[in-house]
Image: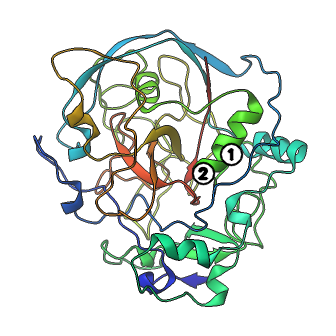
């Protein structure tokens, strides 16, 4: 296991968007946001498009899915914890669709792999010749051991650390992947019903193709997460996440070194461990981040009208993240087991983050939808 303190050398240049309370901004400058800890935007590991052309979609029904009747809602920021990329709030209409009631599990992903022979990005060695095309010119080649197949793993320190140095709790672990979440000595045995992790966007798309489904757009995801509630902060309403009984799998205590596990879990939790929202969807807050179909654009909401309804938006045409101009990023939603209200409130239904399309991490998974 190798700590990632030499970020520029090993190419995992990381920056995150969670920060303290923000006021609404007409022209948000996400690039100026301070660093935080809930999400890792590591540099692309492979930068090559995996071939899923041999995957044959299976005949699928709607078992394990919830029907979401389309409608209109106000998309975007709900409270003063919102970040600039959540503004301005705007009206959106989405069509009806079916959505998985929970995140794709290890057992479900294993079935996909068993039937197709699919190999995830985290299981492949890194191609430096391709990788160097999307990092700053002159970047040094990483040591050979850092180009071996692996993934980013949350590795908490034993003491309090500065929250502007994520190398204190994120490590590049050779041999980490969906079958070995913490590294080669770990296993998913006994965690079959946990959400699958170390899944990049391309892996999620491949699974969706096999399942006869697709990833949700950002608008579809947020509409479903809100569960019919108008302008509420969380999938369950407005009650603070720390009040009452546990409502989601998040970080309880002092991040990143103390987790009291008030919610019953240190890392991922079995799906359906907490009450669903009003639509019958589980874990729309916390547990693991979820990939969406949309490119991430920090200014996208500013391009949408605020005086009329946008119908079934498909997101921007390309990625736009000022902090990571060399690679392509899709939007992830929902937050993860690492989110904590003291620094990161990404279990809010309006919260959005960028994720590099070829990079999987130990707190990122997905769920599918079907028309």
Contact between labelled residues 1 and 2, with CB atoms less than 8 Å apart = yes
Q: Is 240 rendered above or below residue 202? A: above
Depth order, front residue of 290/256: 290
Residue drawn 77% across the image and 59% down it: 179
Is residue 13 found left or right of 114 in the rendered image? left
Q: Relative to 267, say whether 304 is above or below.
A: above
Image position of 193 with respect to 67: above or below: below
Give the number of callouts: 2
Give the percent coordinates (x, y) of residue 98. 60, 17
What residue is pinned by disc 2?
A: 268
Q: Would you place residue 68 above or below residue 24 in this image?
A: above
Q: Earlier in the sequence, mark 2 or mark 1?
A: 1
User: Which is more toward the observer, 62 or 180?
Assistant: 62
Q: Label 1, secondary structure: give it.
A: loop
**What's the mark number on residue 194?**
1
Q: Quadrant of residue 76?
A: top left
Query: Is 48 on the left or on the right of 7, as rendered?
Result: right
Q: Residue at x 82, y 55 (%)?
A: 189
């Amino acid at each position: 296991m190798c700590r990632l303190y030499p970020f520029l050398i090993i190419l995992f240049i990381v920056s995150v968007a969670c920060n303290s309370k923000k006021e609404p901004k007409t022209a948000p400058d996400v690039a100026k946001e301070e660093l935080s800890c809930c999400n890792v935007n590591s540099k692309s590991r492979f930068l090559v498009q995996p071939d899923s052309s041999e995957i044959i979609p299976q005949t699928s029904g709607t078992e394990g899915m919830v029907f979401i009747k389309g409608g209109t809602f106000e998309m975007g920021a709900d409270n003063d914890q919102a970040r600039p990329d959540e503004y301005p709030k705007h009206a959106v209409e989405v069509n009806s669709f079916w959505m998985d009631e929970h995140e794709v599990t290890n057992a479900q992903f294993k079935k996909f792999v068993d039937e197709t022979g699919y190999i995830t990005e985290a299981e492949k060695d890194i191609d430096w010749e391709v990788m160097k095309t999307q990092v700053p010119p002159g970047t040094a080649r990483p040591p050979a051991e850092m180009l071996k197949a692996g993934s980013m793993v949350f590795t908490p320190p034993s003491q309090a650390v500065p929250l502007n140095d994520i190398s204190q709790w994120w490590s590049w672990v050779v041999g980490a992947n969906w079958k070995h979440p913490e590294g080669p000595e770990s296993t998913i045995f006994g965690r079959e019903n946990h959400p699958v992790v170390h899944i990049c966007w391309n892996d999620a798309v491949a699974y969706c193709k096999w399942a006869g489904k697709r990833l949700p757009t950002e608008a579809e995801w947020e509409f479903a997460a809100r569960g019919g509630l108008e302008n509420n902060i969380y999938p369950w309403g407005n009650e603070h996440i720390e009040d009452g009984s546990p409502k989601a799998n998040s970080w309880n205590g002092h991040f990143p070194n103390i987790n009291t596990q008030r919610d019953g879990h240190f890392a991922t939790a079995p799906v359906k461990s907490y009450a669903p929202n009003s639509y019958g969807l589980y874990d729309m807050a916390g547990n693991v981040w979820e990939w969406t179909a949309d490119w991430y654009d920090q200014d996208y909401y500013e391009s949408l009208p605020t005086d009329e309804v946008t119908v079934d938006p498909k997101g921007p045409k390309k990625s736009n993240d000022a902090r990571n101009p060399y690679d392509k990023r899709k939007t992830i939603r929902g937050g993860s087991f690492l989110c904590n209200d003291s620094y990161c409130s990404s279990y809010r239904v309006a919260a959005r983050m960028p994720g590099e399309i070829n990079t999987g991490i130990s707190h990122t998974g997905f769920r599918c939808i079907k028309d």
